[in-house]
Image (tube, rainbow, N blue to C red):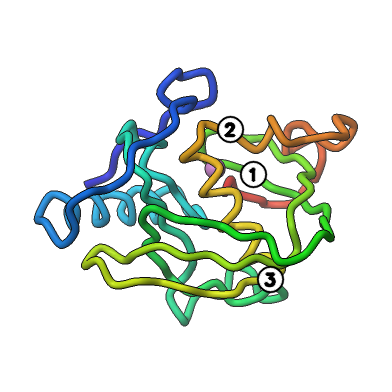
Amino acid sequence: MIHPILRMGDPRLLRVAKPVERFDTPELHALVADLFDTMHDAKGAGLAAPQIGVDLRLVIFGFAADAQRYPDDDVVPQTVLINPLIERLDATEVDDWEGCLSVPGMRGVVPRTERIRYRGFDPSGRPIDRIATGFHARVVQHECDHLDGILYPMRVRDFTRFGFTEELFPGQDIVDD
Ligand code: NI
């Protein structure tokens, strides 16, 4: 089921979400299906449960193998990540553009750690443990920020590189993330 996506300003986006305590339940699988329906409908690269008003530490991101939306970037495997932990493996921060389905029509340059290890669980409770770099690492950091009530504009440092997509990239058909 496709849900409305909350927009920045809604206080539910500012909560620190609660850990998932029971895995492999019908409710959890239904939530994951709804998140994928909602993300695909919005043509997003990732979505966090708080963005549909669900106060749980669960994010989805990535693309099925045939998706070619970001051909120049690292492949981001389609993932459900629950109760995530991120470890920064690199002091280097890299600037790049981000958008967010909760901040429609806008883009901003955000510094993110270049290389991370992330751990968590899939919906059945199986552990996930991966190293990610570049765009993959950026997406994970962006989505997991939602679980702590952080939206990417809060991480923008140079506000000369934040604004409306249509003004920043005229003539280009760029969708929200
Ligand atoms: Ni977002």
Give how far apart the Cα atoms at labels 2 and 3 are. Answer: 24 Å
Label 1 Cα neighbours within 10 Å, binned few <14 / some 14-19 / many ≥20: many
Q: CA distance from mark 1 to mark 2?
A: 7 Å
> Depth-wise, is mark 2 or mark 3 nearer the camera?
3
On the image, the x and y values in percent for residue 28 come to 19, 52
Please give the count of numbered marks on the rendered protein: 3
Check disc 3 and report the residue beneath it.
133
77 sits to left or right of 109: left
* Residue depicted at x 27% and y 55%: 32
Asked if 9 appears above or below 35 in the picture, the reply is above
Q: Residue 122: x and y, percent?
A: 31, 66
Residue located at (84% from left, 60% from top): 92
Of 77 and 147, which appears nearest the observer?
Answer: 147
Q: Is the CB of the residue bearing disc 2 within 8 angstroms of ligand 1? A: yes
- The amino acid beneath tag 1 is Gly
Looking at the rendered image, the disc whose residue lies closer to the viewer, 3 or 1, is 3
What residue does disc 2 label? Answer: 103
Q: Residue furthest left?
A: 26
Q: Is mark 1 within 8 Å of ligand 1?
A: yes
